[in-house]
Image: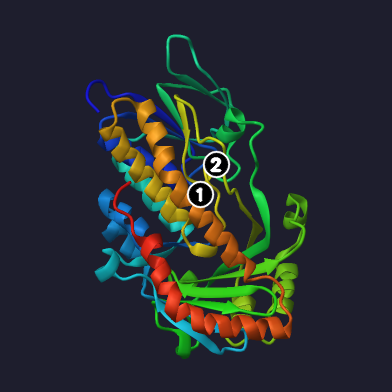
Amino acid sequence: MAGKRESFTIAGAGIAGPVLALFLKRAGYEVRLMESYPRPAEDIGGALQIAPNGMKVIRALGLVEELLKIGTPSDEMIFRNHKGRLLGIIPNGSPEKFGEEAIVVSRSSFHLLLLNAAKREGIPTEYGKRFLSAEFPLDGGVVSKFEDGTLAYSDYLLGADGTHSKVRNFLFPNFPQPEYTGIVNAGGFVSADVIPAKYARRGPIHFTFGPEGFFGFAACGKTRDTSWMWWSNLPREKEFTREELESMDLEAWRNHLLELHKGWYEPIESIIKASHSILKGNVHDLRSLPSWGTEKVLLVGDAAHVMSPHTGQGASMALEDAHSLSILLERSNTVSDAFREFERIRRPRVERIIEQSRRNGNHKKKLSPIGCWIRDRILTIVLPKFAVKGQDWLYQYDGV
C-alpha cells in the first residue's frame, strides 16, 4: 500500500495480537498492543499444536529456531480405544508434502516467545488494559477506551481479544455469542518419568476414544518436569458456571477424571494421578458471525471465529489470520479494502474448520458398548483412507 502508513491499536496479546503487531511493525505501520492481563502470563493454558500451515507463518516471522528450542516436533497421530486397541496411525502432515512439520508446545512458552519477539522489535505492549468501548471522531480514526481510563488513539482498531471478545461485544452487541459444545476440557502436564517406554518416543500425539470421553497425550517441550502434556474431553450436558469451576479443588477434579477414565489403558490413570495441577474449562465455538468488522475495526482470531480444539487448528488459524491480513494490506488500495477482502477470503476456510471441529467433538460423547464397537470399526477403516486426504485442505496454506 503506497503512501502514509496508518496506525493500529490491537486489543489482545494472546497469539493473533503479537503476530499481527510483528507483521504490521515490519511493514512500517505504527502499532500499539493492549493486553487485559496485568502482566505477561507465564502459566496460562495447557499445550497446543502448531500445524504445518501455522508453521509457515512462524517461518515468515523468522521464529522457527526459537520455537524448536521450546517445542517438540510431531510426526504422527496414533489412535486407540480405551482398552489400548490400535485403531490407526496417520502422519501428522509432513515437511515433504506441506513444507513444514507440526510442533507441540506449551501455550505459555509460545505466548512468551511471541511477546519477547515483539519486545525486541520495540512494539509498545501495555498490560492491565481491558477494552471497554470506542469512539469514532468525525475527523477520522478510532479512540479506544479501556476500563482503567486509558485512551488509545489510532487510525484503526484490531480486536484480537479471544473467545469472549470485548471488542466484538461492543461492535455487535446483538450478534450470536460463543456456544457451549457439550464438552468440558481438562488437562495438565507431567514429567517424562510417568510415560512408559512403549509410548516414550517424542513425536506421536496419542488419541484415545472411550465409551464416554476422550484422552490425549504428547511430548510438548524440553522442561523435564512438564515435558508431556495431556488433555481429557468430558461430555456434559450443561456447562459449568464460573463458580462451579472455581469451587472444585484439585483432588475433586482428579477423582472425577479417574472415575471417568477408570480401567483405561496405562499410562492414562498414572498421568492423571501424577499431575500437580489440572486445568479445566468449558469448550465453546462460534459457527458464524454476520460480519467481522467495519471500515475502522476488524476482528481476528478467536474474536472473529471461535473454534473448539478438536482439529488442533486454533493457534494456526490465529497465525494465518495475522499473516493473511498483512499480505492483504500490502495488496490493497486502502486499509478498509483489506479488511473487506480479509473477511471474504478467510471466512469460508475458518467456518469449514469450525464445523469439522464440532463433528470431531461429537465422537467424544457417551456411547453404548455397541456404539463403541461400531465407532472403533468405522475409525479403523476411515482413518487410513480418509484422514490423510483430509489434511490436504487443512494443512495447505499459501499466504491468503
Query: Mark 2 and 1 residues: CB-CB less than 8 Å, in contact?
Result: yes
Residue at mark 2 to residue at mark 1: CA–CA distance: 7 Å
Q: Position of residue 376 (x, y in %)?
A: 59, 84
The residue depicted at 45 percent of the width and 24 percent of the height is: 296
The residue depicted at 54 percent of the width and 33 percent of the height is: 129
Q: Residue 7 appears in which quarter of the rendering? A: top left
Residue 85 seen in the figure: yes
Looking at the rendered structure, which numbered label has been put on residue 41? 1
**Badge 1 amino acid:** Ala
Looking at the rendered structure, which numbered label has been put on residue 37? 2
Crowd tier of the residue under label 1, counting other residues whose Cα lies within 10 Å: few below 14, some 14–19, many 20 or above: some
Q: How many marks?
A: 2
Q: Residue 185 appears in which quarter of the rendering? A: bottom right
Residue reaching furthest top?
Answer: 139
Q: Is residue 209 left or right of residue 53?
A: right
Q: Position of residue 64 (x, y in %)?
A: 28, 58
Q: Position of residue 147 (x, y in %)?
A: 60, 28
The residue depicted at 64 percent of the width and 83 percent of the height is: 374
Residue 224 seen in the figure: no
Q: Position of residue 138 (x, y in %)?
A: 47, 9
Instruction: Say which element carries label 2.
Output: loop
Classify the position of the N terminus by image quarter: top left
**Badge 2 amino acid:** Tyr
Q: Is residue 359 left or right of residue 24?
A: right
